Image (cartoon, grey):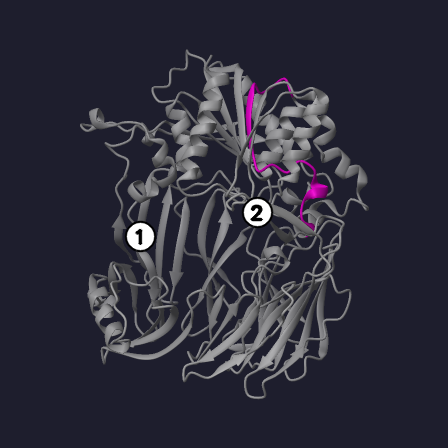
Amino acid sequence: MKKIAFLFLLLGGSNAYAQRHFTLEETVFGSRSYAPQSIKGQQWIPGQQAFSYIDIDLQGRKASNNWKSEVLLTTAALNNALAAKFPDNTFSLKNFPASYRWKDAYTISMTVSVGKQIVAVEYDLRKKTMLNSIAAPADAAEYFFSKDGRNSAYLVANNIEIQSADGQKWQVTTDANTAIVNGCSATHRQEFGIDRGMWWSPNSESLLYYRKDESMVAKYPLINWGTRMAQTNEIPYPMAGETNEQVSLQLFNLKTQQTIKLQTGEPLDQYLTSVTWDPSGKYIYVGLLNRGQDHMRLTKYAAADGRFVATLFEEKLSSWVEPQHPLLFLPTQPNQFLYQTDQHGYNQFYLYNTEGKLLKSLGYKDVIVDQILSFSEDGTKLTYIGITNNGLDRQAFELDLKTFHTKELTSLSGTHQASSNGRYLFDQYSNTTTANKAVVKDLKSGKTTELLNASNPLDGKITMPKMEFITLTSADGKTPLNARILYPTNFDASKKYPVMFYLYGGSHAQLVTNKWLGGAGYFDYYMAQQGYIVFTMDNRGSDARGRDFTRVTHRQLGQAEMADQLQGVSYLQAQSFVDTKRMGIFGWSFGGFMTTSLMVNKPEIFQAAVAGGPVIDWKYYEAMYGERYMDTPQENPAGYAQSSLLNKAEKLKGNLLIIHGAQDPVVVQQHSMAFIEACIKAGKQVDYFLYPTHEHNVSGKDRIHMYEKIARYFDLHLKK
């Protein structure tokens, strides 16, 4: 077991007398006061060795001026320009719009609110005038502006409308049946990396969109108590093994006003992923994923008539295939694209041509591609963020698309956010000893210019506990696991302390990272300040460690995860400063499932637990996520029975508080209610609290109420 201690959080100095603990309000809204200073909204300016950013106004820094700051456009000047363009409205923007983008070296596009509309505008910095504008209704559910700035597509209820800059309108869909939803990003419940439901063609003359038919999906009732007589809001919710939604891709042509359907074929409940336009606009690419999620075909369609052209390649795995990204076409080679997959262990790049031939595997060491940043201005290099150091770090890399050589652009341990124009790298990073630092690096000479070195925003204000990273070993004895410990303020190793064991444990999430505060939240630190050892570990099945690390959970959710978390329990039990009779556990969503699982499978360990929005039985969870890991209940009855907590309620010994949002459309309330009923039948007492108006997460000021309830619950049962 390896330890790395970070004593920087034991703040001292002449201001120590003024320090205090976090308030509960600050655990929710503390980032407003205690977020480290940073450079926000950074973008490279096309055709210039310069970048812009937002600091109330639009600021700029350029290489020829040694990266000194200068004002490009004040927010006041923007307000005046907007008022001149839209004289019937008043504007009082306090900060420059974060939506701004550079169209060219002197033209900025952005979206602003104008009366009852969202308007995309362009501003010419040389002429100091507002140029084109195009609008969408402010109450539009979603909206997308075409690249040329001529058209906006948006949702009104479940239908799509398009409006042009000259005022022309198109009613793209007219479905009266609300079970038919067009152009919505919530298609396939936003699994598979889906973040939009509409795509403009490269020439802005056609709109591709999802058409989702939920008429065959069972409806789940959510109760609204805010009316005189409580009402139900029925939402389509396809539980595992039940009838799923049917999705197609439609293409509307503005000139002909005709709609065609891509011939994606059957079965109709397959998943349509990785949707990408060809740069020429002649073809559309779609990843067809079967409902079992173990077979994906990347297919090609003609945009002219929607006909199927070819299957470029296929991916098959005995566990699951999970396409998460659209294709990335090379700017200099429009017949070649990068495809991301973890088929060889880690999510990395593979270069294909548009005929489906694999040209090159571009994986670099065991680095996991985390985020694509940008192409260089000449299109020959690609910058991206990669995951290193057993998942703890995020570093910047550059892939040369001519030589296929990968270069590491950053090396300091930590979490880097970066962007590059090919010549210079803007790098902003933090780690456990660096609140935030921003530099510009000349990629040719290697010279680095410091732009910002943020001070510790907590210094002299908040008494911060000591934080420590440790490395444990997975239950199979093979894999290092990252863990974090927060020690109580004024920690004394000769004393014994209660524990709050905080966990999540599910896919696509990571709690322990090498960044400011170690990835811990303010509530974690608050509980340490209240005298708790706060422990967190990322088990197998969580994110950022590669395919094998995740796939061990296949068809048996909760088993490997629980076994690994018990390694953390064993570590704590071996520490002389841990009071093993005063251990509590807390988790939300998948973490709520893990919390309840440990309370009924290992009832002798924890004396108190809080499970928020917990999955109790995976047969009640939605098909897209649940079937990926568990297959269907019909295909895997033993796995579902093993992971279900309903038949284990009789084993409960400790104090358990379950919290649920009554409007939860993700983990529906049936989970916790079924467990309550099982506890009643087993003669087990359990505490339950409902947030009537909240969905899967309790947000806003009510989150303060929730944290107070959790803290009080642990104090009641662990501080006797």
Q: Tag count in the figure?
A: 2
Q: Which residue is mark 1?
A: 438
**Residue found 36% across the figure and 45% down from its top:** 430
Location of residue 479 in the rendering, given as x and y in whole percent from the top left corner: 61, 36
Q: Secondary structure at mark 2?
A: loop
Tell me if residue 89 comes above or below residue 633 in the rendering: below
Q: Which residue is mark 2?
A: 508
Which residue lies most toward the bottom here? 256
Region in magenta: 603-623
Label 1 to label 2: alpha-carbon separation:
28 Å
The one of 128 and 106 positioned closer to us in this rendering = 128
- Which residue type carries mark 1? Ala
Task: Pinpoint residue 118: horizontal percent, then vertical percent.
Answer: 39, 69
Q: Quadrant of residue 425?
A: bottom left
Q: Quick check: 16 left or right of 653?
A: left
Query: Which is in the foreground here, disc 1 or disc 2?
Result: 2
Question: What amino acid is labelled 2 in the image?
Answer: His
Vertical position of residue 128 compared to residue 544: above or below: below
Q: Mark 2 Cα within 10 Å, few/some/many (few <14, many 20+)? A: few
Q: In the rendered structure, does residue 474 fall within the stretch colored magenta?
A: no
Query: Toward which corner of the image does residue 519 lie, by quadrant?
Result: top left
Mark 1, secondary structure of its residue: strand
Q: Earlier in the sequence, mark 1 or mark 2?
A: 1
